[in-house]
Image (cartoon, rainbow, N blue to C red):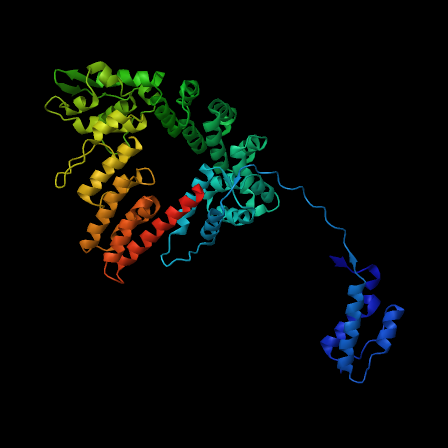
Amino acid sequence: MTTPTATLGPAADGWAELETAALLGTDRRPLPDPAGPPALLAAAGAVDRTDPAVALLDLAALAAVRRRAGGQALPAPELPAAAPPDDRRELPRAAAHRLAVLVGGRTAGAAPANLAELLPQWLGAALERGYRLPPALVPALLDAARARSELRGDVVALAGPLGRWLAERNPDWRFVHRTAAESVPGPAGPQIWQEGLFAERVTYLARLRRERPEEALQLLGSTWATERAEDRVLFLDALQDGLGAADEPFLEAALTDRSKNVRATAAELLSTLPGSALATRMAERARTAVRLEGRRLTVSPPVECDAGMQRDGIPPKSPTGRGERAWWFGEIVAAAPLSLWPADTGLGPEQLLRLPVGDGESDWTDDLREAWARAAVRQQDADWARALLGPVPRPGHPGRTAGSPARLLSVLPVAERAAWAAAFVRAHGLGDAFQLLGACGTPWTPPLSTAVVAALERAAGSGAYPWSHSGVLGMTERALAPEAAPAVEALAADAAPDTAWAETFTRLAGTLRFRAAMLAELDG
């Protein structure tokens, strides 16, 4: 970089006068007299002034050359220290090329894969395998993560020290420091808790909770009294991860919080703590409300919501419009440990679910099952969830599953979820399967993928339109096993040309092929 010296200013070489003559025209403004050092005066004196316009250009050229030749270079700026080294292994070349395609958003093939959906999968897979990003792609990925917050965690982790180094020089990427501090212990962590945005504080607390539960609890307790009520609720949610007996005193204290939402959240967390005082109190209330008499469960719901019940998070007024006694009853059973029922009756979940409920005049079956279903999800009890789900209902005999089937399904092991969902899809098609499929782990197991592909084939054969299954199709692009690609390609080949289903199957097959290649490259 150069800069004119002090003697090369406009006044020294007549540059301003030349500009004025050029703007006004040499007819209105005569050529200025030569000015400047002797060498310039000599050169300017030799300019032919027969044509003033040409002479003006010649004089301007002389002045410009003289000013540039007289410039002095600025001192070289001090280069920053290099980014810290990254010891992780280098990404395979093919995977790096695939990443460039994903970030660029274009494929070369005829079948346009949904790249926006595939980028998070690529990032997660690369992070699991311990790669570092190619330096040339880090800026583009930081830009992508700036626009899509769901990518930030993986991008920042993959970008590593180079990403943090770059973020120090570009304010558009300052989210990197906030995100990096969540996984990198250091002084930035407490600073985020004190000065960060709410979402940043929640994320930081959640990360700290996963890594060091007791330290996270201490951090939350240090500012608890000054937090807003709506913030306290979400901060409490972060304690679900790693919840243990050490949290009970803090949560018991939160039962007296001035916010009813905070009290309810604390009560819900305590109800999932085996052996907590609240769980014990709820168990006693549940025993009073439900008794095994012979081969029947009799129900005696509470007649009032006393102060103790309210302190334990049971609202006196039903927010759902249900009768108050039924509401109190459901809240008690849902918060009571499920282990008490087999312990008190000697019967397992399936046996208990087969018993009649009520005294013959009033039927409390649905209320009791709904409460048990909530407890099964809250306590992540697979035995109860399995019993409440039961076998897949037959077509034409849908029956009724207590609670949300998708939520109960999420409690089961991954393979079992997939098997149940596959059986449901085979029996009922895709019409009511969206939430169930969403509860299954990805990628879907081969049996579940086969069931979904077969259901898509039936849907196409029935004359339905692809967009009537757009939700499932979008999920299928993300979750269908890559091994299903040949079957989908066969459907594309069999579909009538230039139809919506042909296009849908071709696109889906292209996405599966793309995803399979993507994962293979990361393994290479």
Q: For the C terminus, which image quadrant?
A: top left
Kindly tell me whether residue 50 is visible in this rendering.
Answer: yes
For the residue pair 316 and 411, the one nearer the viewer reads as 411
Image quadrant in which you'd find residue 367: top left
Residue in view at x 21 percent, y 39 percent: 424
Place residue 269 in its image quadrant: top left
Q: Residue furthest front?
A: 524
Residue at left 19%, top 54%?
A: 461
* Residue found at the very far left of the displayed protein: 360
Q: Is residue 277 above or below residue 372?
A: above
Location of residue 178 in the rendering, given as x and y in whole percent from the top left corner: 54, 38
- Asked if residue 190 lies left or right of residue 351, the reply is right
Residue 183 vs residue 241, the one in the foreground: 183
- In the rendered image, the quadrant that contains the N terminus is bottom right
Query: In this rendering, is residue 380 above or below 445?
Result: above
Where residue 146 appears, as percent x and y from the top left, is 50, 47
Does residue 137 lie above or below 380 as drawn? below
Task: Report the label total.
Answer: 0
Identify the residue at the far bottom of this view: 50
Task: Give above or below for 276 relative to 25.
Answer: above
Residue 294: percent from the left, percent from the top? 12, 15
* Picture coordinates of residue 8, whole percent (x, y): 82, 63
Q: Is residue 327 visible?
A: no
Residue displayed at 77% across by 58% down: 3
